[in-house]
Image (cartoon, helix red, strand yellow):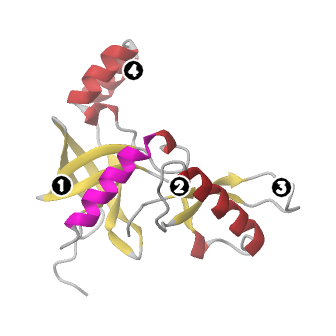
């Protein structure tokens, strides 16, 4: 066991724009990627009231405030993806890709809230995807042909943005309705993370 490995759960703080955000680091999002951490945002009573007030403002005011203090607009749970040692180029590329694929955020890819500083390390703040990676799907797994069909559909959408790098796939949500090509129902699929 690595004595320098972080312990979980633990309280952390990170900077996102001009916001300082406190959160409970619940643990790694997925066991293979210990640099990807699931967070629960901590807010006191007055902070919750402020967030409720901000949500009632006109859209233009919310956008202005969000550009300065994006931490106020984070959902209760997010994912913090820390920069891995010597992965600066990949980190910058992933950030660029998230910005380029903005129209797909919240649909095929997680919402990218921005780059943060956490414990002296650069990190990406992303929306949480509640699901399992494709290799851990429950049995019976998605049939090969159905999996292939869904992957091809995703890559067609990515192709519009001239992006086709292999990425991690998650199954999430509730079981979908049977497709015309398949009589069984399975979890819907979403892309999560560009680089591991």
The reply to whether the magenta stretch includes residue 1 is no
- Disc 3 vs disc 4: Cβ atoms closer than 8 Å? no
Q: Position of residue 184 (x, y in %)?
A: 84, 63
Label 2 element class:
loop
Rounded to the nearest angstrom, the CA distance separating label 1 from label 4 is 26 Å
Which residue is labeled 1 in the image?
118
Compared to residue 21, the image places residue 174 above or below, namely below
Q: Which residue is mark 3?
A: 178
Left or right, 139 with respect to 73, comes to right
Instruction: Determine if residue 140 is in view.
Output: no
Q: Which residue is mark 2?
A: 130
Is 15 located above or below residue 196 in the figure?
Answer: above
Label 1 or label 3, whichever comes before in sequence order: 1
Q: Are marks 4 and 2 in contact (CB under 8 Å)?
A: no
Figure check: 178 above or below 5: above
Question: Callout 4: 10 Å neighbours few (<14), some, many (20+)?
Answer: some
The numbered mark, 2 or 1, whose residue comes first in the sequence reads 1
For residue 55, the mark is 4
Q: Which stretch is magenta? A: 88-102
Q: Which mark is residue 85?
A: none
What is the CA distance from the residue labelled 1 to the residue labelled 3? 43 Å
- Pointer 1 with pointer 4, Cβ within 8 A: no
- Quadrant holding the C terminus: bottom left
Predominant SS of the magenta segment: helix
**Residue nearest the viewer, comparing 78 with 99:** 99
Separation (CA) of disc 3 from disc 4: 37 Å
């Amino acid at each position: 066991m690595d004595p320098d490995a972080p312990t979980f759960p633990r309280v952390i703080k990170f900077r996102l724009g001009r916001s300082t955000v406190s959160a409970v680091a619940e643990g790694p999002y997925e066991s293979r990627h210990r640099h990807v951490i699931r967070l629960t945002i901590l807010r006191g009573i007055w902070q919750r009231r402020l967030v409720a007030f901000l949500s009632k403002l006109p859209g233009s005011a919310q956008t202005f405030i969000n550009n300065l203090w994006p931490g106020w607009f984070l959902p209760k749970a997010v994912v913090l993806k820390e920069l891995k040692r010597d992965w600066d180029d990949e980190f910058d590329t992933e950030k660029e890709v998230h910005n380029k694929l903005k129209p797909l955020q919240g649909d095929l890819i997680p919402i990218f809230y921005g780059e943060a500083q956490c414990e002296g390390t650069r990190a990406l703040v992303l929306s949480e995807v509640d699901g399992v990676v494709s290799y851990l799907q429950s049995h019976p797994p998605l049939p090969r042909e159905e999996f292939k069909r869904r992957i091809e559909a995703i890559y067609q959408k990515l192709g519009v943005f001239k992006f086709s790098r292999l990425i991690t796939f998650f199954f999430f949500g509730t079981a979908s309705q049977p497709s015309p090509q398949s009589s069984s129902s399975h979890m819907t699929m979403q892309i999560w993370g560009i680089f591991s």
